[in-house]
Every structure is written in structure tokens, then in C-alpha cells.
Image (cartoon, rainbow, N blue to C red):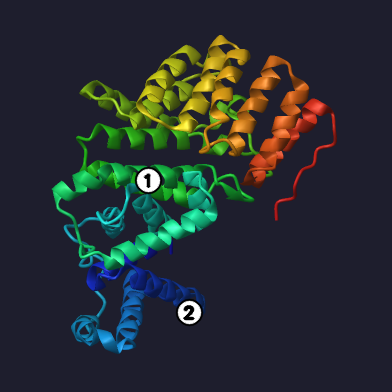
Amino acid sequence: MRELTPQVLGIVVRRFRDFAAAEDAVQEASLAAAIQWPRDGLPDNPRAWLTQVAFRRMTDHIRSESARRRRENEAALEVDQPAPPVDAARESNQDDTLILLFMCCHPALTPASAIALTLRALGGLTTAEIAHAFLVPEPTMAQRISRAKQSIKDSSIPFQPLTAEERARRLRAVLHVLYLIFNEGYTSSVGPHLRRADLSHEAMRLARIVHHLQSDDTEVAGLLALMLLTDARRLARTGAEGELIPLTQQNRMLWDHQQIAEGVALLSVTLPKGAVGPYQLQAAIAAVHDEAARPEDTDWPQILALYDLLNRMSDNPMVALNRAIAVAMVHGATKGLELLDALRDDARIAEHYRLDAVRAHLLELAGDREGAVRHYRAAAGKTGSLPERNYLLTQAAHLSNAPQQIIEQE
């Protein structure tokens, strides 16, 4: 359903030019499928089934609004036809999800709003998850998504397949969307599970399609390489009970070395081509971690040099936070803690759990057990992820010799 729903939404939006109504129609079709398919069996063409039901819902919607009589007549001529087969529904054999991805990066929207709307429409993320990705309160994100839909409705620019020039203008926003979807899938911000494989795999699938269409763009290749190199560690990141296992304690034999080789090869082709962007630098950092046979073999000076470049290129507090870790590994925990002090005044990250978690880790390295316990517990109180919360409480309990307050995963 996660794979088909964005494709059907793309078809309905292109046909009716009304994003909000199309989204409602596709949701109703998905609900009907959830009820009927288990009872009646999977249809021969599930996508066509969903498309036809969504078309009917749109027809009902149009007919219910007498002020839109002209649109009703135009739509009726189209929706009375049979639902298009899967191949015929694709334009130029492109993935409908990808078409919708580019269409959601709408000129009527700010980049931030376009990204939020796309995460909602294609990634299936909740408003809370999107808010976490943007480091803003949930009500703020809900208003942003609502305004984005209204802006599209009020705009004279329709949703439609894009020209090559339009794709190029919207590409960076599209890459950021895929990056956020992958991150939410790789480390879920809320819930009982550390990762949501459906999201990370969908982001990688779409990134491969974008790379196929934009094979000369080095940042597209860099993003795909970053996803491959990061996702390669997935099997080693959790234990038998779903508990989080940090990078330094992972069984590296469980890493997907074929996927690592693919990511490194892609990056090796990309880096010599010229301008280096943030995704390529992050991929290079991931490659350094992946190529270390043991944690103590990690080339931290090289990682720090890459973070120095990335920090100069990007005004991102998470980059500054990760650079502080690299500084601590190269120059000592005290130097890393000094860098963290500057982030306390950055509203984008001041209340984020990772700032406390990193501070706790560096305090532990510096020998300040009491301070580390305090910040591990503070971080645990701020994260919505149960595996991360349990890990942080476990670290605090280990340092304080107190009973571990593990939260049961329902």
C-alpha cells in the first residue's frame, strides 16, 4: 500500500489538478482496500483498483459542489473511462511516485513547505515525525502543511509533469526530501522500533530512480552513496530484543559489505568530477566509518577534516554537533565539550535530545560520571524513540550503579 498510494495519488492529482481533494480521495480508496482486500482477495491489478475507486470518489466530490458544474462535466468525461493499466498510467515510463515527488516541490511553496508536504504525501510520515525532522513544534508543522495545501489550491500553477528545466530547478529540494525520509526510516523519531525499513527503503528506491534520470549530477550520486553506506549497518544496529547497539559495539561482520562496496564505488566515481557538495561529504564520512575493520581503526582525523569542510558549507546545527564528536575523538573530550557550549544558544537544537546525549557521552569520556548521568537522563526524557530512550537510561544506570529503568515496548 505504501508503494502504490503515492503512485495513485500522482495519477489523480495530474487528472484533477486538486491536491487536497485528491489526497482525500486516495485515502478513502486505501481505506476501502484495507476493508475489502482481506475479505475478497487481492485484485489482479491493485493499482488500477485503487485508481478507479479514487476517481469515483473525486467524481462524487465534484458532483457535490454545484458551484463547480463545469469541472464536474469535464471530469465526468474522463472518470467514466476504465482505470488506466499500470504501464499506460506512466508518462515516459517514469515512476509515478517520482513524478509526484517533483510535483510536490511546487513553485508556489517555500522550500521548507514543499519538503514538508512531500514528506506527508509520499513518505507517509506523521506531522509529529516531520516536525521532528525540521526541529520545530508539531503545531507549527501542522500549520505549515495546511498553508502549503492552501497555497497550491490558490495558485494558478497546476500540478503536472515537469520539463527537464523545471526538474533541475527543483532537484535540491527533492534531494532534501529523500534525505529526510531516509533519516526518519533509519532512526525513527517516535515509537517502539529503532527503524522503519519501509521508509528508508522507499527513499533509497526513489534515490536510485533520480540518479538514473540525473546520472551526471554529483550530489544525486552523493546522496545515493550516503544512503547505501549508512543503511549497510542496519542489521548490526539492534539486538535480539530490538535494543539499540551503538556504532562502536556493533558486530561489523553483520554489515552489508556488498552494499558498502557499491556506495564506495559510486562515491569514488563522483568525487573526482568537480564541485563537492554536502551529500558527497556525508557519504565520505560514512565510508570512513564503514571501511574501518574495528572501531579503533577509524580514521578520526580524516573524519574531522571532512566535517570541517561540511561545517563551512552548511549552517546546520546537527553538522556542528557531529563535528564536536570528531573534535573530541581527535583532540580530547574537553575540546569537544567547548564546542557544544556554543550550541546551547541555537534555538534549532537547544532542546533536542541529541545535544544532551552527545554532552553525556563526552562527559563520560572526560571522567565526569555525575554530569554524564544527568545529561543521559535529560536526553532520555526528550526523545520519543523507546529504543533510544532505553539505551540512554541504560547508560545512565551503568554509570550510577542504579537499577535500569527500562521501558517496556508495547
Type of the residue with mark 2: Gln
Q: Vertically, is 37 above or below 339?
A: below
The image position of residue 227, as x and y in percent, is 41, 37
Q: Is mark 2 on a helix, strand or loop?
A: helix
Q: Which residue is drawn at 70% across and 31% down?
A: 375
- How many numbered marks appear? 2
| Image vertical order of residue 36 relative to residue 132, above or below | below
Q: Which mark is residue 408?
A: none
Q: Which amino acid does label 1 sit on?
A: Leu
- Looking at the picture, tell me which residue is in the foreground, 93 or 270: 270
Q: In which quarter of the image is the N terminus?
A: bottom left
- Would residue 150 be seen by someone viewing this image from the given angle? yes
Residue 367, above or below 118: above
Determine which quarter of the picture holds residue 65.
bottom left
In 3D space, how far apart are the residues under numbered discs 2 and 1 (Cα atoms)? 32 Å
| Residue in the picture at 54% in, 28% down | 343
Q: Can residue 125 be seen in this view?
A: no
- Residue 344, position as x, y percentages in the image: 58, 30
| Residue indicated by mark 2 | 36
Q: In the figure, residue 405 lies in which quadrant?
A: top right
The image position of residue 251, as x and y in percent, is 59, 28
Circle 2 or circle 1, nearest the eye: 1
The secondary element bearing badge 1 is classed as helix
Q: Which residue is label 1 attached to? A: 178
Is 43 on the left or on the right of 85, as rendered?
A: right
Asked if residue 267 lies left or right of residue 164, the reply is right
| Image-based side of 369 in relation to 74, left or right | right
Of callouts 2 and 1, the N-terminal one: 2
In this view, which residue lies farthest toward the right?
402
Q: In this view, does 149 lie above or below 37?
A: above
